[in-house]
Image (cartoon, rainbow, N blue to C red):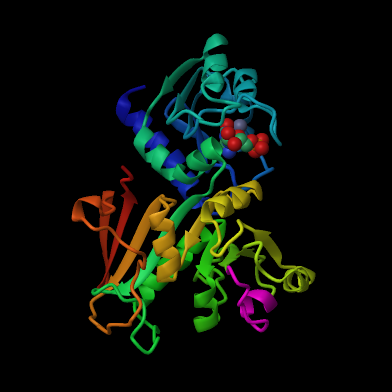
Amino acid sequence: MDKINDEYYMGLALDMAEKAQGQTGVNPVVGAVVVKDGAILGLGTHLKRGEPHAEVHALNMAGTTAEGSTVYVSLEPCSHYGTTPPCAARLIAEKVSRVVVACEDPNSQVAGHGIQILRQSGIDVEVGVLRDRALKLNKKFIKYITTGIPYVTIKTASTLDGKIASKTGDSKWISNESSREMVHTLRHRHQGIMVGVGTVIADDPQLTTRLQVPGLSPIRIIVDSKLRIPDSSKVLSDGLAQTIILTTSQVDPTRVSTLKNRGINVLTCGEGPQVDLQDALAKLGELDISSILVEGGGRLNGSLIQNRLVDEIILFFAPKLVGGLEAPGNFRFDGFDLMQDAVSLKDLEVEQIGDNICIRGIPDWP
Ligand code: AOF
Ligand code: ZN
C-alpha cells in the first residue's frame, strides 16, 4: 500500500485515539484500523484502563475477515500480559498480513518486543507512519511510563501584563468563555489538578470538569505546607472528586487525622517549611497519577519553574492591562539575574480564541 493510504488510515487511528484522551488513566490512548481490499473492516480505540486494547476492539469487529488484512495501530502492539493479554499474539492468531505502527511503545515490558515478535512470525511490519503526531498525542504516557513522575502542565490565565488578579484580588473573569471551556477540556485530559492553598482560600474553587459535553473530573491536589485550608472549602466537602493535600512533617498531626477522617488523603512531602515538590510528584506518581494540570497561583507556578518540574506551559492572555504594584503575577519566584538564564519555551503554538490568545510551549531546560 502506498504512503498516502498508510497516512490516511493511521490518521483515522490517531483521530479515534485523540477523542479518548483523558479517560485511559495511566494508559496511553491508542487507535486501530483493520483494512483489506480498500475497505475498513474494523475500528477500535482503547477506552479505559483494564478494558480491551484498541487492536482487540478492531479485530473483534473485523471477525474472520481480518485474515490477510493490514492493521494500522497508533502505538506498537503490546507483547506482555498486563491486565489484558498481548495484542501482538492476537494479531498473529488472526493471521493478518501487515501491521503499520506509528511509534514504538516505551513501556519497558514492550519496547520493541511487540514489533519483533510480529516480524518473527512473518508479518510485514512498518514503523513510523505519522510518528511525530503519535508521540505528541501520548506525551503524558511517555513521560510517566519512563520516569514514574507525572507530566506537569501549568496553565495560567492572565492580563497582557501578566497579572492573574487585580491589586484588590479580583479575578473574575480575566479570560473569555471559550478560553475557559478549553481549560475544562484540559482538566478532563489530566488525572490531577493542582493548586496552592492560597487559591483555595481566595476563590474556594471546585476544580471539577464542567463542559458542554460530559467530562471526567481530575483528582484535586492542594499544596498546603501549613494546613491552612479552611474546613468549609468545597474541595473538602463537596464530594465531587477525590482530594489530596500535600503538606510537610511540621504540621499538627491531629489536624492531619481530622482531614484523613473526612476521606482526604494527606501526603507528607519533606520536612518543610515548604512542600518538597519533587518528592510530591514522585508520591503522586506512586498513586497512579500520570498527569497534573497546575492552575496556580503564581507562587506555586514559580516554585515549579524554579525547580524545573514543568513539562508544558499553556498561557491564556486577555487583551487587558490591570497594573497594580502588588497585583499577583503568573509566575512569582526569585527570578534570574540575566536574561540569558530565563526559561525559554520551545515547540511554540499560538492560537487566537476570540479576543484571547493562547500560547503553548515546552520549557527548554538547559
Ligand atoms: C496496545 N494497544 O490499545 C494499548 C496499549 O494493563 P494493560 O493490559 O492495559 O496494559 C497497559 C500497557 O499496554 C500500557 O502501559 C502500554 O504499554 C500498552 N498499551 N498497547 O497494544 C493499546 N492501550
Ligand atoms: Zn495491547
- Quick check: is 298 in the magenta stretch? no
Q: x, y percentage for residue 322?
A: 26, 84
16 up-or-down from 121: above or below:
below
Q: x, y percentage for residue 34?
A: 51, 31
Residue 303 sits in which quadrant? bottom left
215 up-or-down from 10: above or below:
below
Q: How many marks are shown on the rendered structure?
A: 0
* Viewer-side residue, 334 vs 265: 334
Residue 283 visible? The answer is yes
- Residue at (42%, 20%) from the top-left corner? 126
Is 265 displayed left or right of 348 in the figure? right
The stretch of residues the image draws in magenta is 224-238
Query: Where, quadrant-wise, is the N terminus in this rendering?
Result: top left
* Viewer-side residue, 296 vs 14: 296
Residue 25 visible? The answer is no
- Residue at (56%, 61%) from the top-left corner? 275
Q: x, y percentage for residue 48?
A: 63, 48
Query: Where, quadrant-wise, is the C terminus in this rendering?
Result: top left
Q: x, y percentage for residue 57?
A: 61, 38
24 up-or-down from 4: above or below:
below
Query: Secondary structure of the magenta portion, mostly?
Result: loop
Q: Quadrant of ligand 2?
A: top right
- Quick check: is 233 in the magenta stretch? yes
- Residue at (61%, 26%) from the top-left corner? 109
* Viewer-side residue, 4 vs 149: 149
Residue 46 sits in which quadrant? top right
